[in-house]
Image (tube, rainbow, N blue to C red):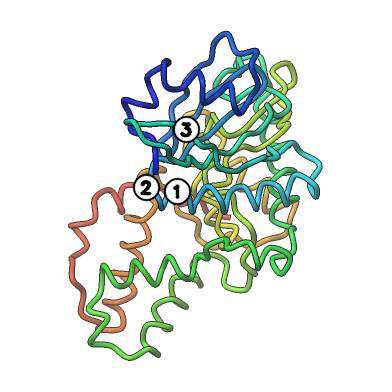
Amino acid sequence: MYLTTSQASDPIIMMPILKQIVGPRLDNYQKLTSANAFVYQVGEDYVKFPNMLCAEKALRREIELSNFLSKRVSFSVPYFEYGQITTCLNGEDCNLFFAKSKKIRGIPLYQATMRAVPHTTFATSLVDVLDELHSINITDISALGVPSFKARIGKLMGMVIQSDQIHLKTKKSIFNKIRSQLGANEKDVLCHRDLHGANIFVNPLSGVVTGLLDFGMAEVAPPAIEIADMSVYANMGLVSRIAEMYRMKTGRDLGNLYLYHAGDRDKWLQGLIVSCAKELNVPVKIISNQISRVEKHGRVNG
């Protein structure tokens, strides 16, 4: 069973539940914004309740990966305690899955006064963190259920092309064409894929990145995907700088890197699939101009 929006917003319901998890000394709590879970801050503790089955599965993956990374990286990553709690909702006993973690080092980037922080310091430390994350041995996380970029492309192909009319070899050709634009010879790495201002923690005085939060969208993918997902920093003039610094530090190939708005991730990939399918004369279900904004984004050339 999962909490409803009205239940999650009702202090009469939530106070006793949170007291069972965090402890009896609970005078107040703050409900935070999240798309797939109800999140509460109680002092230094954060408590998550998924709001549906698919969100619970994603949260369980996030817990396993985050707990794995917290013991293996130098930057701060949440360590989760988790389990089920029995409570009474609508007059009957039910079990709620929850995850609890402590606040990590630093403050969220969006709370920092970035005007006082040299952008180069922030960019340099973020590249250092990404290099460490992307250097994690993929074999070591194979049992954690982290999704793959290849599987995501496969699902998108089913939405975009007449896949029942083409041979498996042709599907592989489309994937290889897409993959070749993202650093053809680069191995896939562990990508965070959701590096916005609430998920990057920094030292507010220096701007140095201290930790990463929320690995719920993590994926084994080309490193170019990670950088493209960071177009949120375009208004700071940092995307091109981060991409170039990343290339120089890691030596990894980002290919012909396109930047896109975070909300257009799959639209951008659908556009690539349509383009590649047309080159191979593969029938498609949609046409290019049905994919909004694909051609409106810039390319970062190395």
Q: Residues within 10 Å of mark 2 (few under 14, many from 20)?
A: few
Q: Residues within 10 Å of mark 1 (few under 14, many from 20)?
A: many
Along the line of sight, the residue nearer the viewer: 225 or 60: 60
Residue 93 pos. (x, y %): 42, 37
Return the disc, 3 or 1, that comes first in the chain's sequence. Answer: 3
Q: Residues within 10 Å of mark 3 (few under 14, many from 20)?
A: some
Residue 286 pos. (x, y %): 18, 66
As drawn, 61 above or below 37: below
Numbered marks: total? 3
Return the disc, 2 or 1, that comes first in the chain's sequence. Answer: 1
Please tell me whether mark 2 sits on a helix, a strand or a loop. loop
Identify the residue at image location x=35%, y=65%. Answer: 272
Residue type at the position of mark 1: Leu
Give residue 222's quadrant in the image.
bottom right
Identify the residue at image location x=66%, y=40%. Answer: 80
Task: Kindly report the distance in space between the C-alpha atoms of the residues bearing marks 3 and 1.
Answer: 46 Å
Give residue 271's quadrant in the image.
bottom left
Query: In the image, which disc is placed on residue 297?
Result: 2
Residue 91 pos. (x, y %): 34, 31
Q: Which quadrant: the N terminus? A: top left
Along the line of sight, the residue nearer the viewer: 223 or 20: 20
Q: Are marks 2 and 1 in contact (CB under 8 Å)?
A: yes
Residue type at the position of mark 2: His
Please tell me whether mark 3 sits on a helix, a strand or a loop. strand
Q: Which quadrant: the C terminus? A: bottom right
Query: In the image, which disc is placed on residue 87?
Result: 3
As drawn, 183 above or below 177: above
